Amino acid sequence: MLILGIETSCDETAAAVVKDGNEVLSNIISSQVDIHSKYGGIVPELACRNHIENLPVVIRKVMDEAKLGMSDLDGLAVTVGPGLIGALLIGVNTAKGIAYSLNKPLIPVNHLEGHMLSIFLEKKSPEFPFIALIISGGHTDLYFVRDFTDYSVLGRTRDDAVGESFDKVARMLGLGYPGGPIIERIARDGTSGDIKFPRPMLVKGNFDFSFSGLKTSVRNFLANNGKGVNKTDIAAEFQAAVLDILSFKVFQAAEISGCGNIVVAGGVAANNFLRENLIRA
């Protein structure tokens, strides 16, 4: 079975062709980082305009790379939410039009379910059940996953998401956008512990997250210490605080549920410091 998947939930235009549910034949991503970096964050209207321009090109490229024609497809899948509503509509309407013209089924995909189950595209995937930590620009969620369509929310952020916090702290430090890769890079030269930021909501039995207080602590530290601060140490301590919060919650969830399998997904999961230390823990 051949499925064309379309993703336009935020600032990246993406498409992929997947065979039999887990073999990726082609995958094309058109990033808008250069466009939004000058504003220090995503501008929804610009994101939508660029999806309109980029999506036809991305779809054509992904089909060419897979060496397939549209008539070879058995169906289409498209992200329907959550995300920027205007951006989502562009992907959904494009997928609807293609599916209608080909008389093929259209499969709506939840953005967070996509993150949660993306692990099954790997050669080695976990057995059910597992704990899933989704960390991205707009989401920080913890799930107990029993099966492909059977899962429950254990906890969510009550304010900022992890990725959003990285972006805002990077902006405070004058480092640019996106914040995650920049903070990870400069934190390698810093030391955590000399500066001490809080680890909010480390309460046993509570799986919700909160990052606004951590972000505010960084802002207050910068305001109280002037321009002579060591940005690398701030980045290192901020990143360490995020790791402490995430690891406390995810391993507590695994312990209480008696579940030995943990999956970490989402854009922030690309942070090597977080990945390596979660694995080590």
Image (cartoon, rainbow, N blue to C red):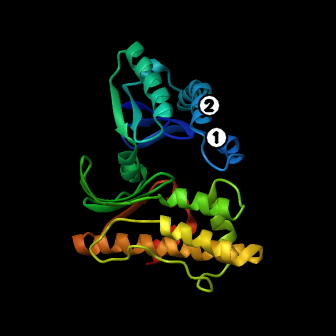
Q: Is residue 84 left or right of residue 22?
A: right
Residue 128 placed where, x, y %?
25, 59
Residue 209 placed where, x, y %?
39, 65
Q: Is residue 73 left or right of residue 183?
A: left
Residue projecting furthest to the bottom: 194
Identify the mark nearer the N-term, 1 or 2. Answer: 1
Q: Which residue is mark 2?
A: 50
Q: Secondary structure at mark 1?
A: loop
Q: Could you tell me if residue 20 is visible in this image?
A: no
Q: Residue at x 55, y 67 (%)?
A: 215
Q: Residue at x 43, y 78 (%)?
A: 281
Question: Given the image, on which type of amino acid does mark 2 rest?
Answer: Asn
Question: Mark 1–mark 2 contact, CB under 8 Å?
Answer: yes
Q: Secondary structure at mark 2?
A: helix
Mark 1 Cα-neighbour bin, 10 Å: few <14, some 14–19, many ≥20: some
Q: Which residue is mark 1?
A: 32
Residue 269 placed where, x, y %?
50, 60
Image quadrant of residue 59?
top right
Q: Residue at x 52, y 41 (%)?
A: 10
Quarter in which the N terminus is drawn? top left
Residue projecting furthest to the top: 101
Looking at the picture, tell me which residue is in the foreground, 116 or 16: 116
Question: Given the image, on which type of amino acid does mark 1 rest?
Answer: Gln
